[in-house]
Image (spheres, rainbow, N blue to C red):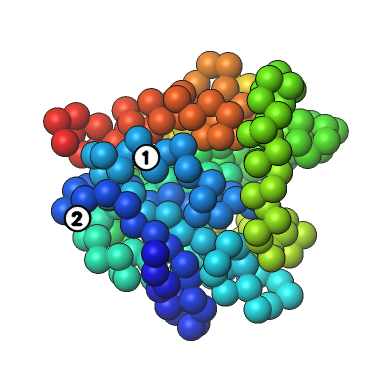
Amino acid sequence: MAFANSADGARIYYEAHGTDGTPAVLFVHGSGGHHAAWWQQVPELSAKYTVITLDLRGFGRSDSGMDEFDSRAFPDDIQAVLAASGVEKAVLVGQSIGAAAALKAALRDPSKAAGVVLAHSLGGIADEELAALVRADRAEAEKLPVLDRLLTARFREQDPAKTFLFRQMGTFNTAKMADLRNLNADGPGVQQVVDSGIPICFLAGERDAVLSADTVRAAAKRVTGSVLELVPDAPHSMYWEAPGLFNAALGRFLDRIYGAKQ
């Protein structure tokens, strides 16, 4: 448990789990989460990897002393944690809005990024065709109550305790979606992502009510050389609702990057 200082002096909370010297994986949470959102990933992965979790500014234990939070500063938070943690390189795993921050951080310094996993997100890639698909998906999602977009009705009925905890996670955050500015600003172009040489994985569920499977397939096709992990019967918050499926898909990508014998 420690704090890193971001470029503008913001204190960013992070944790590192596992054994020093093992390949690193850094998780970036979504809008309702913070470092503890990854409680079902850390125990499994830390046996094999150095696992780093963080709180973006406005979330969890990181600095929250402002009324609005400019998401253009989130990549700075990630870079600060990478520098403070001492890892040479990491696979950056971003969930939902955290994916855009992870991709931007990786593109700023590709030497620190062993790969990027865009979980249930296109990572803010600037592309007219993809943007139109995302807008159409969002229009459909907004017809549903927020919780219906994130967790399936079956899960909420069968596991009310984890559903309650999921809803409580956001109460630890100062920043809410309405406070986040420039979420879709300054996204990289498709060619910039491809030319970076950073391995990219699109990880999503076929039952994602926020981002459709067809949209994810289109993005993976556009980003030449990317890996597509489209998991059957999995929702938007797969990491929470179906952690076994999420961890297995992520593990396959990590094996590609670091080798299955690690």
Q: Which one is in front, 10 or 38?
A: 38
Check the image and report above or below for 10 versus 259: below
Q: Position of residue 237 (x, y in %)?
A: 60, 34
Q: Position of residue 239 (x, y in %)?
A: 52, 35
Element marked by disc 2: loop
Residue that numbered label 1 is attached to: 43
Horizontal relation, residue 247 to residue 179: left or right: left
- Residue 62 found in image quarter: bottom right
- The mark total stands at 2
* Residue sitting at x 50%, y 21%: 231
Marks 2 and 1 sit apart, C-alpha to C-alpha, by 15 Å
Q: Position of residue 213 (x, y in %)?
A: 59, 24
* Residue sitting at x 25%, y 32%: 255
The mark found on residue 28 in the picture is none
Q: Which one is in front, 63 or 99?
A: 63
The mark found on residue 20 in the picture is 2
Element marked by disc 1: helix
Decide: few, some or many residues near mark 1? Use Cα within 10 Å; few <14, some 14-19, many ≥20: few
Q: Amino acid at mark 1?
A: Pro
* Residue sitting at x 34%, y 57%: 16
Decide: few, some or many residues near mark 2? Use Cα within 10 Å; few <14, some 14-19, many ≥20: few
